Amino acid sequence: MNPDSVYLSSEMPDRADHLWRYTPWRKAHPTGNVREIPDAVSTPKIVLKTIDGSSLPEGISLVHEQTEFDDLPNEEIITKSFLQSVTKNSKFTLSVIPKFKSTTPIVVDIQTEGNYCATHLCLEIGRLAEFELVTVIRGECKWFGMMRTGSTGEGSVCNDVFVNKLSKGVTLRVESISIPRDSQFKSGTVSSGSTLTKADLRYRMFGPGGSLNVLGSILSAGEMSLDHHIEIYHDSPETFSRLDWNSACGGSSKTVGTGMLRVSKGSAGADAAQLFSNLLLSSDAQADSIPELEVSEHDVVGCGHGTASGPVDENQMFYLGSRGMSPSESKSTLIAAFLNSTLSEMGGDLMHGWLISELEDDLNELGD
Amino acid sequence: MSEGSEARDAVGDYKAGWHDPENSTIRFDFGLSEKVVRDISQIKNEPEWMTEIRVKAYRHFVERPMPTWGNTKELMEIDFDKVCYFLKSSEGIGSSWDDVPEDIRNTFDRLGIPEAEQKWLSGVTTQYESETVYHSIREDLEKQGVIFLDMDSGLREHEDIVKKYFGSVIPYSDNKFSALNTAVWSGGSFIYVPKGVHVEMPVQAYFRINAKNMGQFERTLIIADEGSSIHYVEGCTAPTYSTDSLHSAVVELLALPGAHIRYTTVQNWSNNVYNLVTKRGVAHENAKIEWVDGNIGSKLTMKYPAVILKGEGSHAEVISVAYAGSGQHQDAGAKVHHMASNTTSNILSKSISKDGGRGSYRGMAKVMPKAENCRMNIVCDALILDEESRTDTYPTMEIANSTAHCEHEASVSKVGDEQLFYLMSRGHTEAEALGMIVNGFFEPFTRELPMEYAVELNKLMSLEMEGSIG
């Protein structure tokens, strides 16, 4: 069915829905008129390169065409059909051949164009591939839509990081990634851009031995509102998942972290945990966490979740002050350490160093 | 198969599942209308303002859609036209058990209420169907000014207090079921504890549904004045029928400055009762409200005891346990709103799912922007005992003040093989070992119960665990 008709014939989501409680669809829509699919949505400039500027290894390519992808169960029809509609001419496939190996992280550099801009990136990762991937968004558009779909290959090891460096505007991000047998997928999110972000990230482990690590380092300042929803499905035995989501909120910003961890019947030996941590840096900042859990299998290694919110530790501030640091330096250091606990897990040293350099300016701003 | 034998078969291990022949003095036809609401009010000879509130609530109930969250499938199966909204089985309220009709007295004898009253209670109220049938309070408490009445008598004798506080904590517009309760409420308890009075022994209410397709809608209002304290215990049972009954209560607590209210519930409805209850308390300066909430029975329970921490230094404590067996969904949890500075709260939730049962924790913890230095701790533990069962956790934390320290943790696990092995190596059978582990899991709840309740609950859980393994 045509995605335009699917979208326009769908019932608009209710705020009673878990997904839309904090950021209603109207706010994440480019024009606010939810019955409209805007025509003038441009295609961003996308460049595939290595993180250190060296030549791109053979076996990885980005082509301007669409690959078929399988839908995940219970997907949100509104955002998915809307993004499919506005990315008809902006579909890319990132292909990685089987047994591809790269020690240098690969960058998908996306430069947005125009007022409204969107793209659909399909991942086609071959079996036993091992590499690190950074997708970075830059530019000044008013609205950016990003959909990523696809599957990792059996036995593959992939560290994948999404970095939002948009200077303003709204970002709508939807991800549906399937993780097959013995595949290890690490999905990091570094968000310090956009005034409003609505992200719906879904991962499904459908083969034994699948492993997923979802990490978030979220900096929100000024009047930003960053809403991330993460759903993880354990649909096969002996699967493993961890979610660690760290948000630092300053100014009068707001972060929302909602998680849904579903362990289906038959997923014996599942081992799953989620942790949302929030650092509140100013009196007007707000952090909401809703880590949900649905377990239908009794023979699990363990399923748990946790959330913690609090201010910067006064004792730590005092200690750093006693070592000669100004309050502003101490605060920046503690915020950096807090965010670094997830940032450092997202990839190897090269990737980590690159991420730190990308975030440096924003961190200093929060410390002030 | 006769109705009696059908019921007996359905009762199984549920000890309170028998029923008595129905001897009603007034019984309304099935279904709800504005006339039913006005008739209930007229029978009770209520003041005009209460009738008006009932009618407004009824209209709100009709207009308001069913909740779109929770077990919507089960909720949609409730047929409000097949519920009896008022049934009176006794002409008056007895102050001695001899005044209570014999069949009803026998029921409460079998449930052990008169015996418990003599041993360890300050006061007792028992509700059978829609109305209170027995009520007593110790003389010394009455002399100290403690008011402990059924809600209907409370409205008659203390209209000014009831008018001031009724619906002040839970307005009828709060949710669909609080609207239903406000429209057709009958029975429940009204308690006022004067300044500085400590009611040392608990007061108890016991709620029994006997008739088929019955709706019980008690309304409870407890006001603890400055520096006072009270412990209220409620229990409930119903016969097992093949058709469903509806229990939809509203409980409002007001703990004025420095007061302490503990509200303990041991809910053991039969597995054909929808238990959709709204419970909320407001804690003023340095007051403390505790909900000790046990959910063992019912078909579907949706109950989230709440505390509004309105006064500085106030404290909320919620201990909630749920057992979800075959055909049951226990959707329980807690809500705490930190409105004032230096407020603290603890929530401990434990659930066990077995034989295809589903246990859910659903919670809301909120810190408002002006509430400085609040602390909150939430712990949810769930045990799944077999492959047919399911457990869910839906916590929500909304923190709008940077000085708040808030923690939530939840875990789901199965009974550890090494724990079973250890206990069996000490000579226990598998069932005994499992019963002990489960009782240990529920121990944070049972240790807060009066001794008699704790012993009964442990026995009940041990019985439930028989045949769980192998």
Image: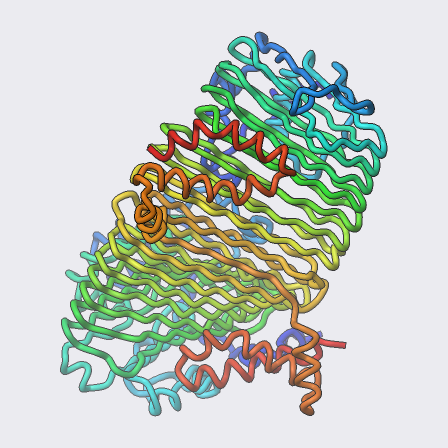
Q: Position of residue B328 (x, y in %)?
A: 60, 63
Q: Residue at x 42, y 62 (%)?
A: B347
Q: Residue at x 29, y 82 (%)?
A: B123
Placement of B97 over or under A196, stated as above or below: below
**Image position of B276 (left or right of A298):** left
Which one is in front, A4 or B284?
B284
- Looking at the figure, which quarter contains the N terminus of chain A? top right
Residue A134 sits in quarter:
top right
Q: Position of residue B264 (x, y in %)?
A: 38, 72
Whether residue A9 is visible to the viewer of this picture, yes or no, is no
Placement of B326 over or under A68, stated as above or below: below
**Image position of B163 (left or right of B117):** left
Q: Position of residue B55 (x, y in %)?
A: 32, 48
Which one is in front, A79 or A340?
A340
**Image position of B427 (left or right of A144):** right
Whether residue B114 is visible to the viewer of this picture, yes or no, is yes
